[in-house]
Amino acid sequence: MTLTDPKSMIRVAREAGGEAHVEPLNLGERVRELRRSRGWTLEEAAVRAGLARSTLSKIENGQMSPTYEALKKLAGGLAISVPQLFTPPSKQQVMGRMAVTKAGEGQAQATVTYEHELLAAHLTKKQMLPYRATIRARELEEFDGWVRHDGEEFLYVLTGVIRLYTEFYEPFELRRGDSAYYDAAMGHNVISLSEEDATLLWVTSLV
């Protein structure tokens, strides 16, 4: 999957069924903003993302359109999800919107440790990022360090048993119906303890 235009227009559906243009997203500026907010040099960010420094520089300057694999590496290096690359914080609020996602019709996004099904994936300018997650990991060592990103996060156990590891607290064992709300800037990882892969409803604030 290749993005043909890093400044491609995001559209918001009107209630009447038409489409309204919103401010275009400059992916290069978004990546540069995220990198600088972490205090990273171009070289450091490239190393963290597993990309060549020249490649990252071209992305930031709008000189190339990254492949989906490159986007996944970028998101991983920045410790955010791929959709968050395209959803910058916004104070502007669009009223009267709704998105319905039928079971199994979410947007799939798989990683080594988690398998995400993004919900309301086509709704832009969201304040929250909801997704259903299947937890593949069984050991903390399967993660390449802590996951941490901007905003706050809420998880609700749908099936199975998990252990929630966080940077500043003792691990919590959570079962079906249990939930947790935490600062996502604090390092966190989740593993399955049950024989089957546990599933969660995860909601991340986009702030």
Image: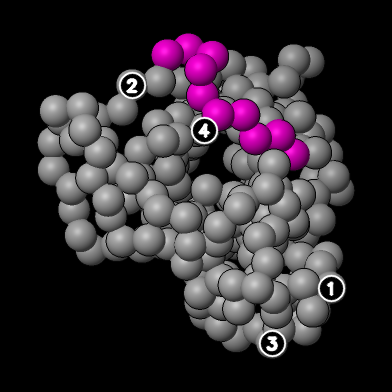
Query: What mark, if any, has residue 41 been given in the picture?
Result: 3
- Amino acid, disc 3: Thr
Residue at the spot of label 1: 52
192 vs 26, left or right, is right
Q: Does dot 3 land on a helix, a strand or a loop?
A: loop
The residues bearing labels 4 and 2 have C-alpha atoms spaced at a distance of: 12 Å
Quadrant of the rendered image containing residue 56: bottom right
Q: Earlier in the sequence, mark 4 or mark 2?
A: 2
Q: Does dot 4 land on a helix, a strand or a loop?
A: strand
Few, some or many residues within 10 Å of mark 1 (<14, 14–19, 20+): some
What colour scheme was applied to this rendering of the protein? one colour
Q: Does dot 2 land on a helix, a strand or a loop?
A: loop
The residues bearing labels 4 and 3 have C-alpha atoms spaced at a distance of: 31 Å
Q: Earlier in the sequence, mark 3 or mark 1?
A: 3
Query: What mark, if any, has residue 100 been given in the picture?
Result: 2
Residue at the spot of label 4: 118
The magenta span reads 102-111
Quadrant of the rendered image containing residue 135: top right
- Amino acid, disc 1: Ala
Q: Residue at image x 28%, y 42%?
A: 12
Question: Up-down: is 136 above or below 152?
Answer: above
Q: Does dot 1 land on a helix, a strand or a loop?
A: loop
Q: Nearer the viewer, mark 3 or mark 1?
A: 1
Where residue 153 appears, x then y in whole percent?
Answer: 45, 48
68 vs 201, left or right, is right
- Amino acid, disc 4: Leu
169 vs 17, left or right, is right
